Structure formats: C-alpha cells, structure tokens
C-alpha cells in the first residue's frame, strides 16, 4: 500500500551480520539514533501529487478517528503519519493540524521533538481525533509508551521520515509495544484501511468503518492477549519441523513478547532462514504441471488462463512472459524473482502474479482442486507442509479470520475475503479498538 524509495546506509550490512546469530527469540536492546538502520521499509518520502490540479477545488469530508481503549497495560499514545494531497510528509500534531517534518538538509537523522504523541484516554474510555485533510500512504500508530520518529534529508533534498523499525532490535523504539493500521483517504477514491501483519504482529487492534450512507464494516483482528499464545504455537511448530519458527518472536529483556516478525521480515535479518524449505515442493509443482494445466482465474476480463511448466518456467496463455522457479524469499515476499511486476507487463501477467504467489504461499497447488487458482475455500489453505505457519497461526487467532498476513491475502475465490480491509466513499468515522475486541 505504501510507496517506498531505496535508501542504503553503511551500517545496514553490519547490523544484519551481527543479528544473524541473535538469540532465540530476539531480545531487544534499544539504542539511540546511532543505531538506526534506514531502509525502504521504515522510511516515508515526499511524493508528487496532482490531485488538486486534477479535481479542481477540493472539498474535504472530515474523517474522525475514534479509539476504544480495551488495553490493560500502560499509557497509550497515537501517531498519524502519511502524505497530504500535495505529496508532502505530514504527522498529526496535538493542535489538530498537520506537522511537516523538516530535516533542514541534514544527512544525519534528526529526532522529531514536536508534539506528535496524542494521548489516549484510560482503559474503558473512547478518544477521538479528526484528520485535517486527505491522506495517502498513511499509518495510524498506537504505542504503549513513546515512539521516536526521525527526519533526514533524502537524495533529492526533500525531508524523509524515518519510522520505528520492527526488524531492528536496537532501534530507539525497539522496547516499545506498538502496532498500526494502514490508511489512505482521498477525495476521488474514498477510504481504504487495513490491518496488516505482512511484516509483523504487534499491539492488537481491530477496526470499524462507518460511511455517510450508514453502512458499517468491521475487521476484528486478533484475539485479546494472543501474542504469547502465538509465540508458543510457533515454538511448537519449530519443534515439529525444525524450521526455526520460534525465531520470529521478539521479546523485551524480561521475556515478554513485544512483536512477532513475519518470515519475509526475518529474512532481512538472516537471508539464509528456511533457505531450502520449499525446494521439494517446487520440484513437485514443476513435475505436476508439466503434464497438466494449471488454470488461473484472473477474476478480470481475461477470465481463466491455462498455464503449463515449460522447462524451467511456467508460461500462461496471453501472458507477456513466464515465471521461473521461485526461491523461498520470492514466495514469502511475493514481490521478487518471478513475482516482480514490471512496467511493461500486460494485464494477464499482473493478474497471474498475485494468484500464483498466493498458491505457493498457502501451499494449495498440490492438494485436490489446486489446479484452479484461486478456487479452494480458505479451510484448504496451509494444510500441507511446507507452508507459511506464521500466516496459518495468525488466521487461526483472528476473531473473524480477517487481516493481511502477506501482501496478497486479498486473493480469494469470489465471495470470500481474508484481507482485513474496510473501504468506501464518504467515510465518517474510522474506529480502532485497541487491545482487541472481546472474543
């Protein structure tokens, strides 16, 4: 959902090398700005927008953000980040206006000390804020304590926002329990918000959207106090298959779970994690579909397209290029190798990529009925090994089974939805339930 730009720093390589040998689980040791690792995953850049020019005079429909505190821990603070209609980076300040981070050309990260931590009321109370304008590539962060945000000059001279990193155990905010909801709300497209576990699981939240039409949409998210249970089930899975699922849990110095990293994020720490896990499965897929069609329902104008293994790649009717054998990193991330989408790719290719990667990710290609994708009900996802047990366990503990656990969790047969999205025109209130809905 967010648009990122590559930014490499010299300390990144040393950081990744030092954490490959991290204990199981990872224990955080919060540092200072010298311990920041700035990557495309934890930065937000200035963008260019022609929204006002395209749509003339902008009429803003105020969006209220409401927070229900069901959390039994310490003081909760809210942070809102994103791009305003001009593309500028903004954060919501305590006076209800946008604050614009300004690095003043500094190549060294500068701590943002403006009043951007918006306190929530105590457990049992509801707190409300109103966004002053439309927002894109947004996040609504909720933290038990204080998060540290920084700004630094990008290569083009604009100020870049450096956000807390879930992957860096020495990040200045590493010891804080936090989570976020992703949000875009524009004049022309309305609102799109989701609960995302694509990179990690943190502070439990659910959400309810109310539109001007009176329609209400709800995604309840994870069960209350589920992090410890999920970590235990990952430990149990690691004991069964030896694939290191227990390494995904991140704790504080006292052993309390703070967050759980998705396998694709953990691989940014240890590139060799689960390196050969899918090898036999991929070979079996190649053998099966060399002799029969794999049908991809594009759920678009192209309808069903027939695909076959031809040598070292899968080719599909009407597709502009084929799909080489994926690596485990390609499958977990769904955005590299055969699953990278290029500007020149046609509509068939753009439809096949998410459906083919989802089939590998959920391990549905070799089960009965797996020759049609998507075609199987969600009770057939993650039923055979190898598979993504992080996603399997998370969906098990979601109250309504909804919430992105990978980037293409919205790939489902028509009529099903596992994605955890709320969307619509003329939104009135987005309510976040922090600490989880009662089960």
Image (cartoon, rainbow, N blue to C red):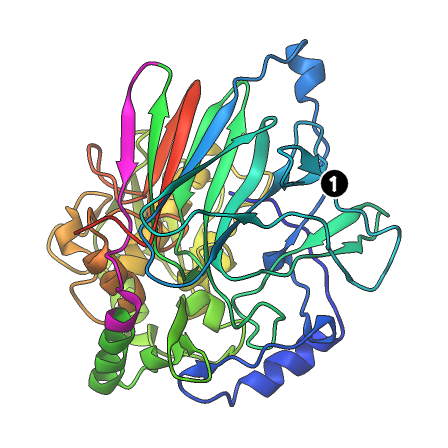
Depth order, front residue of 42/276: 42
Question: Is 287 within the magenta?
Answer: no
- Farthest left residue? 368
The image quarter in which residue 54 lies? top right
Vertical side of 287 occupied by 65: above or below? above
Q: Kindly identify the residue that appears in the image at 51 percent across and 42 percent down.
A: 1
User: How many numbered marks, from 0 up?
Assistant: 1
Q: Looking at the picture, how far across and down is residue 364, in whole percent?
A: 21, 57
Q: Kindly identify the residue that appears in the image at 23 percent across and 71 percent down.
A: 229
* Magenta segment: 213-229
Classify mark 1: helix, strand or loop.
loop
The image quarter in which residue 411 lies? top left
Disc 1: which residue: 100
Q: Looking at the picture, how far across and down is residue 185, in whole percent?
A: 51, 29
Q: Looking at the picture, how far across and down is residue 43, in whole percent?
A: 65, 54
Vertical side of 23 occupied by 277: above or below? above
Depth order, front residue of 168/436: 436
């Amino acid at each position: 959902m967010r648009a990122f730009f590559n930014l490499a720093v010299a300390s990144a390589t040393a950081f990744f090398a030092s954490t490959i040998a991290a204990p199981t689980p990872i224990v955080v040791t919060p540092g200072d700005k010298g311990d920041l690792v700035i990557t495309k995953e934890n930065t937000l850049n200035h963008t260019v927008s022609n929204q006002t020019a395209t749509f003339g005079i902008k009429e803003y429909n105020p969006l209220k953000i409401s927070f229900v505190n069901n959390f039994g821990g310490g003081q909760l603070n809210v942070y809102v980040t994103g791009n305003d209609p001009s593309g500028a980076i903004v954060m919501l300040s305590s006076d209800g206006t946008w604050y614009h981070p300004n690095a003043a050309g500094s190549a060294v990260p500068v701590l943002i000390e403006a009043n951007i931590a918006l306190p929530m009321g105590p457990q049992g109370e509801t707190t409300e804020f109103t966004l002053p304008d439309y927002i894109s590539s947004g996040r609504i962060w909720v933290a038990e304590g204080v998060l540290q945000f920084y700004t630094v000059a990008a290569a083009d001279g604009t100020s870049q926002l450096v956000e807390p990193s879930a992957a860096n155990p020495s990040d200045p905010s590493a010891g804080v329990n936090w989570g976020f909801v992703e949000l875009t709300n524009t004049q022309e497209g309305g609102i799109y918000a989701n609960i995302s576990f694509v990179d990690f699981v943190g502070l439990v939240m659910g959400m309810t959207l109310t539109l001007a039409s009176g329609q209400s949409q709800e995604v309840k998210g994870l069960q209350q106090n589920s992090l410890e249970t999920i970590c235990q089930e990952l430990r149990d899975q690691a004991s069964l298959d030896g694939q290191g699922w227990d390494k995904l849990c991140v704790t504080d110095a006292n052993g309390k779970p703070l967050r759980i990293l998705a396998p694709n994020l953990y691989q940014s720490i240890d590139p060799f994690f689960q390196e050969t896990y899918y090898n036999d499965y991929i070979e079996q897929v190649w053998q099966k579909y060399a002799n029969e069609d794999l049908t991809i329902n594009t759920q678009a104008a192209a309808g069903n397209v027939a695909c076959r293994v031809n040598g070292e790649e899968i080719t599909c009717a009407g597709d502009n290029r084929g799909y080489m054998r994926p690596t485990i990193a390609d499958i977990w991330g769904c955005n590299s190798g055969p699953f990278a989408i290029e500007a020149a790719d046609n509509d068939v290719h753009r439809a096949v990529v998410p459906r083919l990667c989802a089939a590998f990710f959920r391990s549905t290609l070799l089960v009965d009925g797996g020759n049609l994708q998507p075609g199987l009900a969600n009770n057939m996802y993650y039923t055979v090994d190898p598979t993504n047990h992080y996603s399997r366990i998370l969906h098990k503990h979601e109250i309504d089974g909804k919430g992105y656990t990978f980037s293409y969790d919205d790939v489902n047969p028509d009529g099903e939805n596992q994605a955890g999205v709320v969307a619509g025109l003329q939104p009135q209130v987005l309510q976040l339930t922090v600490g989880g809905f009662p089960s």
